[in-house]
Image (spheres, coloured by chain):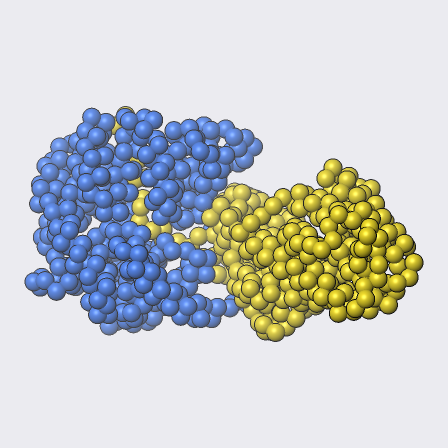
Amino acid sequence: MKRMIVLLLVIAVAVPAFAHKASDAYLTVARDGAILSGRWDLALRDLDLALGLDADGDGEITWGEVRARQDAIAALALTRLAISSGGEKCTLQATDLTIDTHTDGAYAVLALAGSCPHPGPTLAIDYSFLFDIDPQHRGLLNYVEAGESRSLVFSAEHPRQVAGGDAGGPLAQFAAYVHEGVWHIWLGFDHILFLVSLLLPAVLVRRDGAWQAATKFRDAFWDVARIVTAFTLAHSITLTLAALSIVSLPSRWVESAIALSVVLAALNNVFPIVQRGRWIAAFAFGLLHGFGFAGALADLGLPTGSLALSLAGFNIGVELGQLAIVAAFLPVAFALRSTWAYRRVVLAGGSTAIVAIAGAWLVERAFDLSLFAPLAAG
Amino acid sequence: MSVMQRGSAWRKLGVVMAAAVSMTGAAVAAPYLPTDDSVVLERLPEKLDPALGELKRMRVALKADPANLDIALIVARRSIEAARETGDPRFLGQAQAALAPWWSAADPPAAALLLRATVRQSQHDFAGALADLDRLITKRPGDGQALLTRATILTVQGRYADAQRDCARLLRLASGLVTTACLASASSLHGDAAGAYRGLTQALLRAGDTADAREWALTLAAEIAWRRGDAAAAEAHFREALALDSRDGYLLGAYADFLLDRNRAREAATLLAGGTRNDALLLRLALAEKALPDRRSEFAVHRQQLADRFAAAKQRGDTLHLREEARFRLDIEGDASAAVALALANWNVQREPADLRILAAAARASGDGEAGRIVAAWLASTRIEDAAVVALAGGPAR
């Protein structure tokens, strides 16, 4: 027992702070449009731990030993770094290997080149070099875009960083997220169909169990305004809560519920139950749609440095996209409101079609099936 | 410490860090292509210590069988020892990796729990380490290793009464010297330096302990003697300890501090001539060179190296070097306000005599009232006997 104590004695008094530099790698990533370039400095000591560079086992790493494993070094590095933008993976190659010296020894320097097929405002970088061998390893990222650079740190606890999105100043960044928000609502068929389902009856009035044309444009306008405002308010609340990680819901649950909301909204046009209070439905279901927007925003990535600005930009983009739809819809619907075609074909037929489409989404999403995948992409 | 004080300390630290970050990135070297295959680019640690080559082979064996607790424990323990001997934190990370299957487990096997606590302690995760040790000691009340490790952490945190309770439980589990040294560590900082010193020197008279234990006790005796102002006794203990192990980084640093206090900078510089890879020793070497007019050029080089290393640590978000950095800012850069912010942040983490001393020195140099009050309150509440700190805090001069 005493011997054991003495052994640990050595360990117990090991409290003083450590005296050498810990394991770091230095990663520079520069982005110019779709093109990526960069360099990655990896300590030879760390590469030796991961790959066993010291072929002859003499405790020294020569340039010949490094050169012999050039391909293995590049292959390892590229499996430990993944970059994506706009929700799609970017390509990445190691084009050259040289040597550099940092305060704690020699490093292999990999030159990196790549491209992103659909560059979004941000770049998501997943880093996993050496964490399995030394969890105290850090990847020190220097991200360069539009002549500006910023530093981010990868650790075993934070292997993913979102860079960019704040390049080119706050205004450019804000504009980029507004743009993404607009596109998201236009490409998100489920949100459009929900909104359209609520809007279709706005130019009509239900009297004695039958649809009649609204007499004044102003009434129709205010009906639409109430619905759109309620929807906006609701999804802004949940989008913010989810984007700030205050509330989070499983995405399958959210996506299924969104599909259900579309079914119910369209069904209400065919078999009207709720009439006066459609804005309440817009608000209640809008809360759900906000979680859906948050999922899209998560794919896009929010820059940590200016979260609020980007979030506001995305939200405003969604509103603008929505208003554009309303602006296109309302005058046409008002003009056609008295026609048989509007009531029978557009309202009844359209709503029935929406029920069918959204019903299929609901089945797909709830049971994780793929009935007609392309349409469900929104 | 009140929340307000802590907030203020961190705010000050933030200012210092912002200033330091703006200075980093100055040294950007250019990559090159070596001309010859035979060029040696890097010397691995096993070049100096063949035992580390054996550790490397054990790690390969563990990689093939990562869930094998027996191999994992050997790799983790030897990695921790290597970290201690070389001062290289890469080995601590490797110890953590060896414990990976048990690292996040709620209830790992006792031996893994002990090593996990040791790694956490080295990473300054004292709360995590104490939680592990509490669990371990509840499970195995007679685990002397766990008690000793917990006592060490409690002493670092300034919780002397709790530490002494753990030390007392070692009586029947460890040698008299280990138990006495454990008790003396705490009691010497808690108003009984004379008694602690007497007990320690008496225990040292008895033979039968290992060199490691004796070296530890002798270093402790030297530090207590010097805190009490007895230079001759301190010198004798330091020399006896160095005769047992002349490479122990902690001992070298403590003796160098003593020599610097005694205005024996040339001896300190000679002592540390080979220690430039170790940040803590490099700091003392630079301090010695600063006092030696014929070492101007060496001083300039080492000062820059230290600045680079602190910048590198900052870049990775490392806060393990606050004490050393505070001393660097104060005694080498002459930046008292940066030093006091660092010393306060460090004080929130650890409260060893060296932490109190740099806080007192920085408080005095900067005139920071908050830091001065903390030092005065600590002196009064713990009754620590430290001539240098008392002098800095405005008491009777040494």
Quarter where residue A326 is shown: bottom right
A349 lies left or right of A154: right
- Give the residue drawn at x 58%, y 44%: A51
- How far from the left and from the top, in percent, is residue B273? 30, 58
Q: Is residue B210 above or below residue A114?
A: above
**Foreground pick, B264 / A145:** A145
**Foreground pick, B81 / A28:** A28
- Give the residue drawn at x 82%, y 52%: A208
Chain letter tied to blue: B
Quarter where residue B167 is shown: top left
- How far from the left and from the top, in percent, is residue A66? 59, 52
Q: Is residue B301 above or below residue B253?
A: below
A249 lies left or right of B301: right
User: From where the camera sits, is residue B279 visible?
Assistant: yes
**Foreground pick, B333 / B157:** B157
B215 lies left or right of A310: left
Chain letter tied to yellow: A
- Give the residue drawn at x 19%, y 58%: B375
- How far from the left and from the top, in percent, is residue A125? 61, 56
